[in-house]
Image (spheres, grey):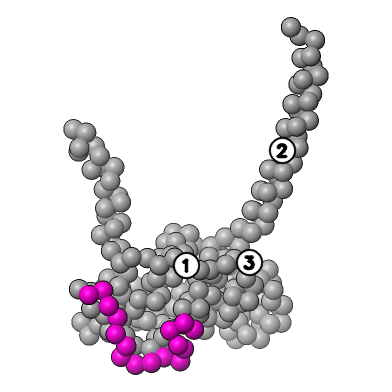
Amino acid sequence: MRKIFFLMLLAPVLAWGAEGGYRLDRSPHDPTDLVSLQSGARLFVNYCLGCHSAQYMRYNRLTEIGLTEQQIKDHLMFTGDKVGDTMKVPMGAQAKQWFGVAPPDLSVVARSRGADWLYTYLRTFYRDPNTATGWNNAVFENVGMPHALWSLQGERGYDPRKNQFTEISKGALSPVEYDMAVRDLVNFLVYVGEPAAMKRKAIGIVVLFVLGILFIFTYLLKKEFWKDVK
């Protein structure tokens, strides 16, 4: 009976391991690196926003990562969008017709999947002639999404038995440069998932500091009240 109960507790972990058998790499993103966040925003708009929206994120919030509204309008917005609009998909329902299913919104993908999963996923696409798109992924097997960043990374093959990638054609970036680009994109997606995270943490530190001071005064007051009690 105990063994069955233990296996029931372990089932979600085993299921997760079966879905994502590829070992995840640790994401080197840094939410305080504004240059990285800005680079990630450009990558998201140029390579992701064509299919994936971030409907809970408004363009004007990008001023929090060091961009001016004019820079946002000039470099990150499509014709007809307003700076107060949310980051919606330009092609609309066409994406569902092309891929068979509507690409998911990426507003909270970093919170649901995790930064490590995203960082590894975006670096493990490979050519697979047996899929509809001609692409597959070592982390997400039989993924319906083609490799949006292939022109940057290049084309690669993959042998799951050896867990080894082989280069088919070079991309615009070197492997190190591509990893840095993915880091920036993941950094931006982490920011989009919780734009107020840094402020929240800073406020939390201040609150803990104030509570620590109040504790000292409370303790001294308690000693004063109880000093004559035997």
Whole-percent x, y for residue 74 in the image: 66, 86
Q: Is residue 191 left or right of residue 176?
A: right
Q: Is residue 158 magenta?
A: no
Q: Real-space Cα distance between discs 1 and 2?
A: 34 Å
> Residue at coordinates 20% horizontally, 37% vertically from top-left?
3
Residue that numbered label 2 is attached to: 212
Whole-percent x, y for residue 56 in the image: 55, 65
Residue that numbered label 1 is attached to: 27
From the viewer's side, name the closer residue of 177 and 73: 177
Give the label on residue 40, or none. none
> Which amino acid type is shown beneath numbered disc 1?
Ser
> Residue at coordinates 22% horizontally, 85% vertically from top-left?
129
- Check the image and report above or below for 47 versus 30: below
Dot 3 falls on a residue whose secondary structure is loop
- Check the image and report above or below for 168 versus 87: below
Label 3 vs 2, first from the N-terminus: 3
Q: Real-space Cα distance between discs 3 and 2?
A: 26 Å
Q: Is residue 176 magenta?
A: yes
Specify the quadrant that holds the C terminus.
Answer: top right
Dot 1 falls on a residue whose secondary structure is loop
For disc 3, the neighbor class at 10 Å (few under 14, some 14 to 19, many from 20) is few
Give the label on residue 32, or none. 3
> Residue at coordinates 42% horizontally, 61% vertically from top-left?
113
Label 3 vs 1, first from the N-terminus: 1
Specify the quadrant that holds the N terminus.
Answer: top left
> Which stretch appears magenta?
162-177
